[in-house]
């Protein structure tokens, strides 16, 4: 069972990495960028018997270590 | 037009970030992880008239600045 966890900054928070890359692209001549954002993805292969168990376990991992709930939000897809 | 660029290390290369997080999860008691990997995602909103033009432009951005072709590979989705 593979879990795909997508982590992004909560809306309204400044993403300095994204801002820096966007500025670099604009300096290179790309003038038609109206938005730029970044996400992190974790791909976890789990030896569990069901998608529900995988999701439960991954939810717990997110809360305990993978995600900073103060500034980040996440979505989980079980594949 | 929104482009989603997913960047990952080429197969066979060591991903130290992934290894470190996997070890932390195992120390926390998650013993059934058989694989762990990470990806970076860039989301770019582009003011262009067609998906083909967006893809062409984003391909160029990847080659010029977003991706390290020596160690990374990428996929582009135009949404």
Image (cartoon, coloured by chain):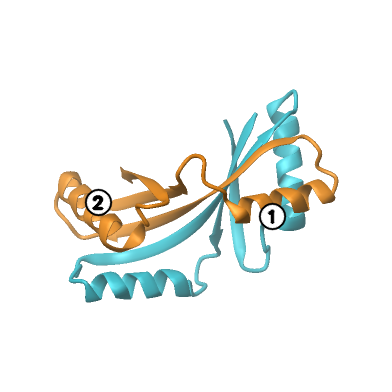
Chain colours: A orange, B cyan
**Residue visible at 68% across and 28% down in the picture:** B51
Which chain is mark 1 on? A
Give yes or no for contact between labels 2 and 1 (Cβ–Cβ under 8 Å).
no
At x 55%, y 64%, the residue is B10
- The structure residue drawn at horizontal position 47% and vertical position 48%, both measured from the top left corner, is A9
Q: In the rendered image of this protein, does residue A70 appear above or below residue B20?
A: above
- Report the side of B75 relative to B17 (left or right): right
Badge 2 element: helix
Residue under numbered circle 2: A59
| Quadrant that contains the C terminus of chain A | top left
Extreme top residue here?
B49
**Residue B35 drawn at (x, y percent):** 33, 65
Q: How far apart are marks 2 and 1 (CA)?
A: 31 Å
Residue at mark 1: A20
Residue A10 x, y percent position in the rendering: 45, 44
Left or right of A27 in this view: B9? left
> Looking at the image, is B60 positioned above or below residue B45?
below
Give the crowd class for mark 1: few <14, some 14-19, many >=20 residues within 10 Å: few
Q: Point out residue A37 in the picture as x, y percentages from the top left corner.
A: 58, 45
């Amino acid at each position: 069972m593979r879990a795909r966890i997508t982590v992004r900054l909560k809306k309204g928070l400044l993403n300095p990495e994204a801002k820096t890359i966007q500025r670099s692209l604009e300096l290179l001549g790309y003038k038609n960028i109206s938005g730029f954002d970044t996400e992190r993805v974790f791909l976890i292969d789990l030896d569990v018997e069901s998608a529900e168990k995988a999701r439960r376990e991954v939810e717990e991992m997110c809360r305990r270590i993978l995600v900073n709930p103060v500034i980040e939000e996440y979505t989980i897809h079980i594949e």
